[in-house]
Image (spheres, rainbow, N blue to C red):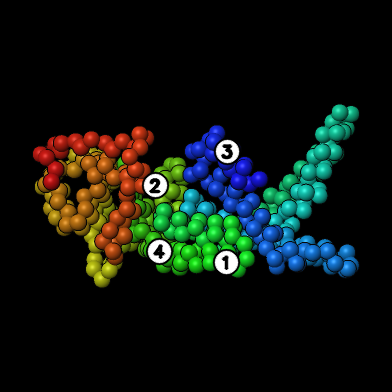
């Protein structure tokens, strides 16, 4: 039935395969089916002579175990798409699922029935209170320390390892299914050792995040909208409120540029970032570029600006999209690399620099 439903969805909406909704829904159902078809669970739930209290206890334990298995099954998908993970939801579901099943839904059904007589208000009030309790459980769970763990970008290879292990566990039976733990464990170890990027640059060059300086993400610009800062936090695998780079003691900022020195990989990296798009003296800019390893700007820079390692101006960012830079490994990842040859990804054409062709 699960396979038939998946086939039906993919025939009508094949693009849903790469979306989190399809992946999470079918992964959760597959995890439930695989768990309850396993021999230990079937034996644990088999009918036996016992008191009603023992029977209810076993059901409650199974509800908790099912929630944990679903959370674990969904964790790689959530980390890949949303850069966050948490397992406390399984414990909250032990209360939330019975609350919705035995209280909220019957009250809503009763309220709908009483509405035909014009007497549904009391039932709707009780249903509302039950939903408020459900939301209170959710807020309390999410506010606990460690309830949500933000992670850096996973990458397609690690995600494929997780999915391979999960599908093997779900589709095979008997002890051979345990072999699926091998790729999942390898992916987990690689994920735990995956470093967070040191620099994050948006595709237009306006928003720059610096990670690894204390527990806060430093940002070049204060944004009126939280969308840009939230994206930078997610990509860096950090939480909290970003701090303006200009207020950080290790940065030297003027109205035009910010300069910061970062110690990575046993060496000092000098990063120059433009804060405005006004014209500046070319000679002064060229001298500043010569002293920098990386220059970042949301505009086109002249060819006389030649940093030692990277010039991330509009010319480069127009081809690469956003960048994540790992200084210790001296490498960077680009948005363009993950887009492929698709119609919706069109790099900007190179624009000649005002002061001559770029080099």
Q: Residues within 10 Å of mark 3 (few under 14, many from 20)?
A: some
For marks 4 and 3 on the same chain, the one whose residue lies earlier in the sequence = 3
> Element at badge 4?
loop
Name the residue that disc number 4 marks.
194
Crowding around mark 4 (Cα neighbors within 10 Å: few <14, some 14 to 19, many 20+) is few
- Residue 92 position, x and y percent, is 69, 58
**What is the spatial separation of the Cα atoms under label 2 and label 4, in whole angstroms?**
28 Å
Of the residues tagged 4 and 3, which is closer to the observer? 3
Residue at horizontal 49%, vertical 38%? 15
Residue under circle 3?
9
Classify the position of the N terminus by image quarter. Answer: top right
Q: Which mark is residue 70?
A: none
> Of the residues under marks 2 and 4, which one precedes in the sequence?
4
Counting residues from the start of the chain, the first of labels 4 and 1 encountered is 1
Q: Nearer the viewer, mark 4 or mark 1?
A: 1
Residue visible at 23% across and 68% down in the picture: 267
Crowd band around label 2 with a 10 angstrom C-alpha radius: few (<14), some (14–19), many (20+): some
Look at the image and tell me whether residue 44 can be seen. Answer: yes
N-term mark: 3 or 1:
3
Q: Which residue is mark 2?
A: 222
Q: Secondary structure at mark 2?
A: loop
- Relative to residue 357, is residue 209 depicted above or below? below
Q: In front of the other: label 2 or label 4?
A: 4
For the residues labelled 2 and 1, the Cα–Cα distance comes to 53 Å
Residue at 52% x, 40% y is 16
Residue 176 is labelled as: 1
């Amino acid at each position: 039935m699960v396979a038939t439903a998946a086939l039906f969805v993919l025939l009508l909406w094949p693009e849903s395969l790469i979306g989190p909704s399809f992946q999470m829904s079918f992964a959760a159902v597959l995890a439930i089916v695989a768990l309850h078809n396993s021999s230990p669970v079937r034996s644990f739930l088999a009918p036996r002579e016992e008191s009603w209290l023992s029977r209810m206890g076993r059901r409650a334990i199974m509800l908790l175990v099912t929630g944990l298995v679903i959370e674990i099954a969904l964790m790689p998908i959530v980390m890949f798409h949303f850069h966050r993970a948490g397992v406390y939801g399984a414990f909250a579901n032990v209360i939330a699922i019975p609350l919705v099943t035995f209280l909220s839904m019957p009250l809503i059904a009763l309220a709908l029935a009483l509405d035909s007589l014009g007497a549904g208000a009391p039932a709707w009030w009780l249903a509302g209170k039950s939903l408020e309790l459900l939301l209170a459980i959710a807020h309390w769970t999410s506010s606990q320390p460690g309830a949500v763990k933000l992670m850096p970008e996973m990458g397609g290879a690690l995600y494929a390892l997780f999915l391979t292990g999960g599908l093997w566990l779900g589709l095979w039976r008997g002890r051979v299914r345990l072999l699926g733990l091998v790729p999942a464990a390898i992916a987990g170890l690689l994920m735990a050792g995956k470093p967070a990027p040191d620099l994050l640059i948006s595709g237009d060059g306006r928003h720059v995040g610096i990670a690894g300086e204390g527990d806060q993400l430093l940002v070049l610009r204060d944004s009126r909208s939280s969308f840009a800062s939230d994206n930078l936090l997610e990509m860096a695998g950090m939480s909290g409120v970003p701090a303006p780079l200009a207020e950080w003691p290790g940065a030297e900022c003027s109205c035009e540029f910010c300069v910061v020195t970062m110690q990575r990989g046993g060496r000092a990296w000098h990063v120059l970032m433009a804060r405005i798009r006004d014209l500046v003296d070319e000679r002064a800019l060229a001298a500043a570029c010569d002293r920098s390893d990386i220059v970042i700007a949301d505009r086109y820079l002249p060819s006389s600006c030649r940093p030692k390692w990277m010039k991330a101006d509009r010319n480069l960012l127009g081809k690469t999209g956003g960048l994540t830079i790992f200084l210790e490994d001296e490498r960077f990842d680009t948005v363009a690399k993950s887009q492929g040859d698709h119609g919706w990804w069109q790099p900007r054409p190179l624009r000649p620099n005002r002061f001559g062709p770029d080099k």
